[in-house]
Image: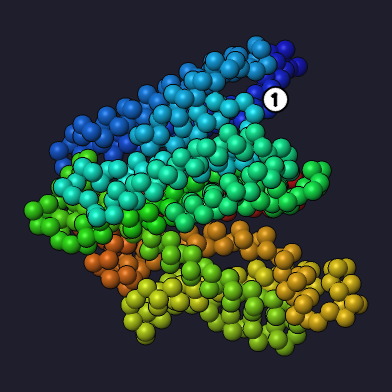
Amino acid sequence: MKSENYFVKKANQRTLRKFQENSALAFGCGASAFLGAATALLAFDMKTKTFGGAPLMIAGLFLAEAAITLLIWELFKKQVLKHGDVSRVFRLIGILLIATIVNGNIFCALAGLSLIKKKKNLEYQVGSYMLLVEILIVIVSYMNVFKEYVCDSFFLGMGVLAVVIVIHAVSLPLVVAYVHGNRADKKMIPLAVVLIATTLTGNLFSLLLGVMLLRKCWTKDDYVSIAWIDVVKRLFRSQMAILGAFIIVFLLTLSICANLTFDYGIAVDNNYSLILQEPSLAYPFGTDDYGRCVFTRVVFGARISLTVGIVSTAISIVAGILLGAFAGFYSGSTDNIIMRILDVFMAIPGLLLPIAIIAAFGTNTLNIVIALGVGAIPGYARTIRASVMTLSDAEFVEAARACGAKDKIIIFKHILPNSMAPLIIRATLGIGAGVTAVSSLSYLGLGIAPQIPEWGNILKAGSSYLETNAYMAIFPGFAIVILVLAFNFLGDGLRDALDPKLK
């Protein structure tokens, strides 16, 4: 027989689950502790068998922030269980957590933004991530001031980012005040347009928030749900999925803004007076065997990895949709011909097809994109074919046929829109696979030219110094792992958000 304490514990858990702040504080505490432990491991110098001073201080800072967040979390739980909510004064403690963004702790900062505001709609959550992306970009870009010189457009870029941060900060209280349910005040239209314009920095959260505001400004019925916004709302329930989206948007924004705030010459020009420098404020990831800043190379390498991953996946999707749709809809001989050709491509193992294409046509970015795109077509085609075959006999398709709709109208207007969910999920995972593939090709010497900053190239150069200067391989390796994990987390979250059984 279960004790009374068991039922009290379950009741308390149900009460706490009603508050977003509880999960945000728990996630911030755990993630900060993990960052602290991981940084402490990185602080160990394999050459001298000692712990480095600066990394150890950063690890201690993360662990201290984890302890502070844990304390705030415990106090939060006590107040909620005792009074049913927390006081306005207690919520001001969130400012302390928001300040942790200065050292890059986005987890505690997000917990602070969640705690400081009692009434939070979806727009406030999107706006919080949008604002933190820009703040983190400014902090990362500011690291360049410790170098001997900065690029000519540095101060212009920092000024633009400062203006964008002000716009994003002002939008947070406005979306809380003027957005209610599925309706938004018409006054929000100019703000929505401005937010969409700030997407030029690469911040896709601002695009999402701007489009959501426009859609809600135009809606006339507060009780009619907006399907795609409901998907976004379900997606934001998953901490890991949104963390993945944050990392992707941050790297995309950084790769675009780096054109203004980072000096590309530091990433490609040899400087023999700075060969194999240890990590420092001027060179956070140290320098390589040619005296180039590894940090700057990793920043510009994100641009290539994301571009190749996204464009190659787009090629695969377009070709896969066309082939899979026609194969599944017409079946018979059309299906046999298309699928048997794709079977030939699927029979070629792993990276062998891209290697063969690159060997035949030469090594450059365009050929790599085409090679990776062609290699992934069969997977997308099979996914679409299965969905189309399932929907071909659906009632709405029969109704379209009865109305005299042509085959192309039925395929592209009725069947494909209802087949996008599995394709979107596969695409997010496919981009991560594309990033891994281009890095693998570069590591093997078959991808991007060695002098160009690309994560596989940086990792290959650092692999020769694992025992003496391990940082050269650790940081680009972490960048690859983190980006691929981010796409996987986002893909898992989209799968749950698009699943009708989990609504």
Q: Residue at x 23, y 33 (%)?
A: 54
Q: Which residue is mark 1?
A: 14
- In the displayed structure, does residue 312 sit left or right of residue 179? left
Residue 338 placement: quadrant: bottom right
* Residue 489 seen in this snapshot: no
* Residue nearer the viewer, 297 or 49: 297
Q: Residue at x 70, y 25 (%)?
A: 14
Q: Is residue 248 above or below residue 89?
A: below
Q: Residue at x 65, y 24 (%)?
A: 16
Q: Is residue 404 above or below residue 180?
A: below
Q: Is residue 402 above or below residue 189?
A: below
Locate the C terminus by quadrant: top right
Q: Position of residue 59 (x, y in %)?
A: 32, 31
Locate the N terminus by quadrant: top right
- In the displayed structure, does residue 141 sit left or right of residue 127? left
* Residue 374 seen in this snapshot: yes
Residue 437 placement: quadrant: bottom left
Q: Residue at x 65, y 68 (%)?
A: 383
Q: Position of residue 236 (x, y in %)?
A: 61, 42
Q: Is residue 116 above or below residue 473?
A: above
Residue 370 placement: quadrant: bottom left
Q: Position of residue 359 (x, y in %)?
A: 35, 81
- In the displayed structure, does residue 365 sit left or right of residue 19? left
